[in-house]
Image (cartoon, rainbow, N blue to C red):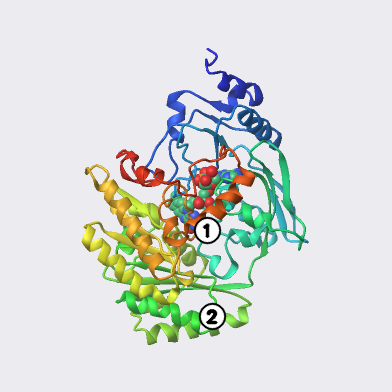
Amino acid sequence: MPPEDSVIQGLIQLVGPGAVLHRQEDLMAYECDGYTVHKAVPRAVVFPSTTEEVSAVVKFLHQRKISFVPRGAGTGLSGGAIPLNGEVIISLVRMKKLLHVDYENRRAVVQPGFVNLKLTHSIAGKGYYYAPDPSSQYACTIGGNVAENAGGAHCLKYGVTTNHILGLEVVLADGEVVEFGGMPDQPGYDLVGLLTGSEGTLGIVTKITVRILKNPEGKKTVLAYFDRVQDASQAVSDIIAAGIVPAALEMMDRIAIEGVEAGNYPVGHPKDLEALLLIEVDGIIAGLDEQIDEIRKICHKRNVREIKVAADEQERGRWWANRKTAFAAMGAISPDYLVQDGVIPRSRLPEVLAKIDEISRQSGLRIANVFHAGDGNLHPLILYDARIPGQTQLAVDVGSRVLQACAEVGGSITGEHGVGIEKLEEMRLIFTDEELAAQIRIRDVFNPHQLLNPGKLFPTPGRCAEMKKGTQTERGRSS
Ligand SMILES: Cc1cc2nc3c(=O)[nH]c(=O)nc-3n(C[C@H](O)[C@H](O)[C@H](O)COP(=O)(O)OP(=O)(O)OC[C@H]3O[C@@H](n4cnc5c(N)ncnc54)[C@H](O)[C@@H]3O)c2cc1C
């Protein structure tokens, strides 16, 4: 039977019946992303296959003043892809081609639904890779990475997504298709930089030109076990202060270690550790042993219990699988968890970790810390049980207090997961009203009627506080 809703009929005419979901049972899968504490059902989900189809769908919705939300794989952790007011979701997952690789100029062109890790897999045979490596890289899309300016373990040395995006094709809020960047050192404003990290509020990215890198000649990976968080944190600062720039410098605390050892990729970390560092150096083989020796010395100075170098690629792979599945592993020790994403100056690590511990004790909720220590990007994982009345709200409040602690030491409320709907109120911790108004004016140039991903990124007076207190459901079960 054809749908009664004329909007859905119109969308079907544009992209075909196999590319529109509109039945309640189909729409439920799209009521949230990785931020599961707030849910809302979309009016429809549309799956365009080409830029022309994206443009036609956006023009159709724009003419009718119907708002819409772009969506990639839905792994976002701040609620950016949630259709707050029953928007139409425009899913980019069918635009998943690797369009072109130019090895000579070290660039590749992908559609937005291309999965991050697939890019490295596609070019590995020629000795190249794509550097930004979010732990969700086996699932998340490069379009979603651009929207969130995603980071990852290896972004300490190589930079986050914005440092690897050379050009974008974008469908604007009225359906116009435009190209930004694409050539080296383009004069004028850096619109590629502006679009990257704009969380789907300025346009829908339909084609991306990325930088690809030649594989480093060699890599060495080290695991260092500590009996005191303070010592591990101090070792992080000392390594950077010694002028070493590791490709990755990751840290896990006791509860995180308990989680990863109970998860699908245990590697046998001792159960009584207080913290571990996973450190990787890469580059020309000749210099690597020297860097490892230096790291060893620093860790010994900071009372390391044990330090070991991965014997081969298999062992290195196991260590990384253990780290990269840390979020999911929390499911083995807690029914639900909320991921936070604060940033602090590295030198304040011990103090902020102590503060997080205090917040945990006061609230009664356990908090695991697993994070990109090298760049001060904390990921406190707040463990809770949504079945216990009030615990979801408590976890949300605890997350807010953690971000406040980050802001108080001159840090930020997000390193890589974005603001979405989760951190709307916390934007006020780091921006004045004038600064927020200036950013909103930029959004309004691209998105004057707020049809594109409304209610995200910037607080609206009254609105976000209300959303944090009460409208989130207790149905949320963490992914
Ligand atoms: C287990 C796990 C581990 C994670 N680890 C990391 C990590 O290490 N580093 C990190 O940075 N993030 C991490 N994340 C968060 C998430 O994977 C990233 O934010 C990722 O970039 C989201 O990509 P996506 O395709 O899932 O986008 P979605 O979740 O679908 O969307 C995210 C946002 O981007 C917008 N958007 C999506 N596609 C487009 C497009 N084509 N044009 C415009 N806007 C668009 C959406 O509207 C939304 O606001 C992790 C998530 C999980 C679940």
User: Which of the two residues, 418 or 108, is positioned nearer the viewer here?
Assistant: 418
Question: Where residue 298 sits in the image (x, y, percent)?
Answer: 43, 85
Which x, y percent locates residue 211?
68, 59
Determine whether 403 is above or below 287 in the image: above
Residue 159 lies in quadrant: bottom right
Q: Please identify the residue farthest to the front as the structure is shown.
A: 434
Q: Is residue 142 visible?
A: no
Q: Using residue 454 as the reference point, say whether residue 174 is left or right of it.
A: right
Give the residue furthest to the top: 1
- Label 1, residues with CA under 10 Å away: few <14, some 14-19, many ≥20: few
Q: Establish if 139 lies above or below 92.
A: below
Q: Secondary structure at mark 1?
A: helix
Find residue 301 and report its image quarter: bottom left
Asked if residue 336 is positioned above or below residue 164 in the image, the reply reads: above
Q: Residues within 10 Å of mark 2 (few under 14, many from 20)?
A: some
Q: Mark 1 or 2 closer to N-term? A: 2
Name the image quarter holding residue 275.
bottom left
Query: For this rendering, which residue is in front, 162 or 453?
Result: 453
Q: Is residue 437 left or right of residue 214?
A: left
User: Mark on residue 244?
Assistant: 2
Q: Position of residue 161 (x, y in %)?
A: 59, 58
| Residue at horizontal 41 percent and vertical 80 percent from the top | 235
Q: Is residue 349 visible?
A: yes
> Residue 296: percent from the left, percent from the top?
44, 83
Residues at discs 1 and 2 in contact (Cβ within 8 Å): no
Please give the residue where the numbered disc 1 appears in the rendered image. Answer: 435
Q: Residue at x 47, y 81 (%)?
A: 239
- Kind of residue indicated by mark 2: Ile
* In this view, 458 is above or below 296: above
- What mark, if any, has residue 53 been given in the picture? none
